[in-house]
Image (cartoon, coloured by chain):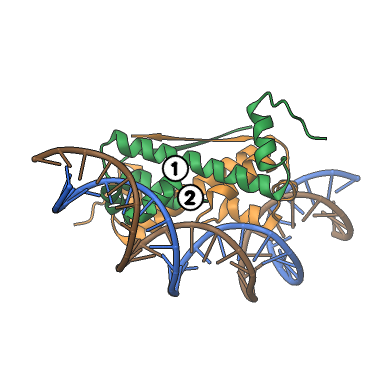
Chain colours: A green, B orange, C blue, D brown
DNA sequence: TATGAAGTTGTCCATTTGGACTACTTTTGT
DNA sequence: ACAAAAGTAGTCCAAATGGACAACTTCATA
């Protein structure tokens, strides 16, 4: 039986994207992670006052890819992310794992 | 002219892998980053006292892939990394960008 | 409100990832 | 030293990434 009174964000997401473990929900979660990554890149780019085209040039790609990365992207290779941050933004990518 | 008395790690890497900007060196740098990632995963796995096979099972892959990830890997997708850490290790991947 | 800059969207396709499987080597425990 | 467990290495290939380009929309500023 369906809950009617949603009380939390996770309830809302369960409602909209399906429950955890389903294929639909996995896809949703994955895309949400990629989306957050895109936002990070966009913020860093804007802080540096660069256009997508300038960033693309330095990172060895093109502005359409940067646009997709910032708002559309499903997934990205580690090396591509690394290259955009290092060569493109002149920054550093920090990765850590918490267990 | 070639330096003979190497004083730093970066000199050593220049010597062994070629100078920055060359294609050979870029490949080296890329693989080194992936290698560091592999070490992170391996450490986390060992801390949890898991075998490659157990980790693989939970992460929805197989032990040969985990082995390659830990010692061999050239590149990895963000979603794959995420899945191995979250589903496999029950941990969290933290990403940040310093500019 | 017109013009150019910035950003978005779509398609094409060569290259790469990674899951599945098998066989082999190394390590561990008795 | 033997057997089992753990890890490494290789191949196959469906599916995904991402570079290139063109066409389109939105935004800024004069």
Q: Position of residue A4 (x, y in %)?
A: 74, 29
* Label 2 CA crowd tier, 10 Å (few <14, some 14–19, many 20+): some
Residue A78, disc: none
**Which residue matches tag 1?**
A38
**Which residue matches tag 2?**
A73
Residue B96 appears in the figure: yes
Kindly check if marks 2 and 1 are in contact, taking CB atoms under 8 A apart as contact: yes
State the SS at label 1: helix
| A27 on left or right of B58 | left
Q: Residue at x 67, y 48 (%)?
A: A24
Q: Residue at x 69, y 54 (%)?
A: B61
Among the two numbered marks 2 and 1 on one chain, the one whose residue lies closer to the N terminus? 1
Q: Which quadrant of the figure contains the N terminus of chain A?
A: top right
| A22 on left or right of A74 | right
Q: Position of residue A5 (x, y in %)?
A: 72, 25
Measure how far apart labels 2 and 1 are at the Cα level: 7 Å
| Residue nearest the viewer, comparing A66 with B15 | A66
Q: Which quadrant of the figure contains the C terminus of chain A?
A: top right
In this picture, is D8 found above or below C14? above
Residue B90 appears in the figure: no
Q: Position of residue B66 (x, y in %)?
A: 65, 52
| D19 on left or right of A48 | right
| Residue nearest the viewer, comparing B80 with B55 | B80
**Circle 1 chain:** A
Q: Are marks 2 and 1 on the same chain?
A: yes
Q: Position of residue B8 (x, y in %)?
A: 32, 42
Q: Which residue occupies the extreme top position in the image? A: A7
């Amino acid at each position: 039986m369906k809950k009617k009174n949603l009380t939390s964000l996770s309830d809302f997401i369960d409602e909209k994207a399906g429950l955890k473990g389903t294929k639909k929900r996995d896809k949703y979660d994955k895309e949400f992670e990629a989306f957050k990554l895109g936002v990070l890149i966009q913020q860093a780019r804007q802080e540096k006052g660069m256009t997508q085209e300038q960033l693309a040039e330095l990172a060895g790609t093109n502005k359409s890819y940067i646009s997709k990365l910032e708002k559309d992207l499903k997934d990205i290779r580690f090396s591509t992310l690394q290259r955009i941050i290092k060569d493109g933004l002149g920054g550093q990518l920090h990765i850590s794992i918490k267990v």
